[in-house]
Amino acid sequence: MAALAATPDPQRRSLKHAFALLLPATLFGFLVAAQWQGQEERSQLAVRYNAPLTDAALALQKEQNVLKAQLQDLRDQLDRIQASAATQTGAAGELQARAAELKAQAGLTAVTGDGVVVQLDDAKNVPATTKDLDQAICHSTDITDILNTAWRGGAQAIAVNDQRVVGTTSSYCVGSTIMVNGTLMSPPFNIAIVGPPTSVLSAFDDPNQLRDIKQRRDVQGLGFHVTRASAIHVPAFDGALTVRFASTQ
Amino acid sequence: MRTSAGGIAASIIALFLGVLVVTQFRSQDVYSRSLQLETPASLTTLIANLSDRNNSLRDEIFDLRLRVESARDSISSGRGSLAEGHRQIEQLKVFTAQSAAKGPGISIRVDGAFDDRAMGDLVNELRNAGAEAIAVNDVRFGPRSWVGRGPDRTILLDGRQLTGPWLVKAIGSTEVVYVAITRTGGIVGQLDLIYPRTRFTVTRETALDLPALQTPR
């Protein structure tokens, strides 16, 4: 008996091994199944609905880029014609000077200068199921609030991810996609602000401004950084100057 | 030999388990943004929005082509491009709020509790709906305008105190702007829930008169 106890029955020993492997093997199987099922569900949905819709959205965005380039080319052509006309008569010269001034105010000319750069991004590695998810990611309203603070601080020209902010600019959110000037965007957002740096920075530092964003940065880890910078480039507005319903008195 | 073979097998399984646990965690639990992950409903809205923008761009391209040709003809016939210059200036004056503006659109009367951030959101929605000129209590919104909280529940627009009830006027395509603002789940619906005691009255307007920006910056 003692000999038996010292060297266990080989059958019992292999049974013990099998039991020891049962738990990891079950877990393994469960995870393989979960992984496979997860992929299966996503791909079925993607194939049926999302893939063609995503393709259509991307194609429209590509088309928009082409249309904007065409529009810019026509604006340049018109500028050249007017510049040559301006040399012909004094009245044309005055008109051109007035138009140039208004174009700068409208955001139709690129601007380079000192100012402030704001970076806005979702918090890193946020669990999708967290109840604070809304607080940890950026929204289109955050962009509206940041632009408002920059104008309040005396900003002269602003661009969000190279989209110039003009009188008709809006930021818009659909699902988790954000649009600025009707252009698809996703974080991180780089907001380039040309203007008096001290005044713009003090507007951002004012504890009464952007309270919500600052609190989310401190608590949920939202990415929000404001830095002084020089030689900031803000491109010209390349969208449509839609004035179809409004007219001067 | 047996123990060592069992150990290797267990290690391999453990390794796979580790990899799978991590993959599973990463693929399902971390929030990520991607167009591919949007719902079909969101994608449809995005497509409609992109399509509208592209149509506006096409309209302007068509318009500009005619203007370029007309300006070329005028100059080659010795008439200069004064007419084109005037036309461009008129358009830019409306766009930059440097001149008063008139046209159809909508008005929104906000009677009750309201604040600067909500006013900023409302103006953002009006612009998104295609509003071309906006004023609150007859003070024009400019390209660099800002809103802030004033004393005694007033709203500051470029530093000017505006007292409620506020009347927001927006020039644009009446039907398009009206529908965008009043649609189910739209900005007025949301504000109605956030400010339950505030009355929001949206009216279609055939002729609005908006003043020019008072403090051009």
Image: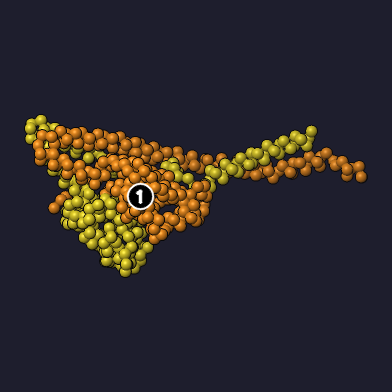
Farthest left residue in view: B78
Per the image, label 1 sits on a secondary structure element best described as helix
Q: The orange chain is which one?
A: A
Looking at the image, which residue is at 74% across and 44% down?
Answer: A19
Residue A153: which quarter of the image? Answer: bottom left
Residue A137 against residue B10 in the figure, above or below: below
Looking at the image, which residue is at 52% across and 47% down?
Answer: A125
Looking at the image, which residue is at 39% across and 47% down?
Answer: A228
x and y, in percent, of residue A13 in the image: 80, 41
Q: Which amino acid does label 1 sit on?
A: Pro
Disc 1 residue crowd, few under 14, some 14–19, many 20+, Cα 10 Å = many
**One can see residue A144 in this view:** no
Scheme of image coloration = by chain
x and y, in percent, of residue A150 in the image: 34, 52
Looking at the image, which residue is at 85% across and 41% down?
Answer: A9
Q: In which quarter of the image is the N terminus of chain B?
A: top right
Quick one: A137 or B158, which is closer to the camera? B158
Residue A238 against residue A156 in the figure, above or below: above
**One can see residue A83 in this view:** yes
Chain under numbered label 1: A
Residue A134 against residue A112 in the figure, above or below: below
Classify residue A105 as left or right of residue A203.
left
Quick one: B192 or B74, which is closer to the camera? B74
Residue B23: which quarter of the image? Answer: top right
x and y, in percent, of residue A209 in the image: 38, 58
| Residue carrying label 1 | A197
* Colour in which chain B is drawn: yellow
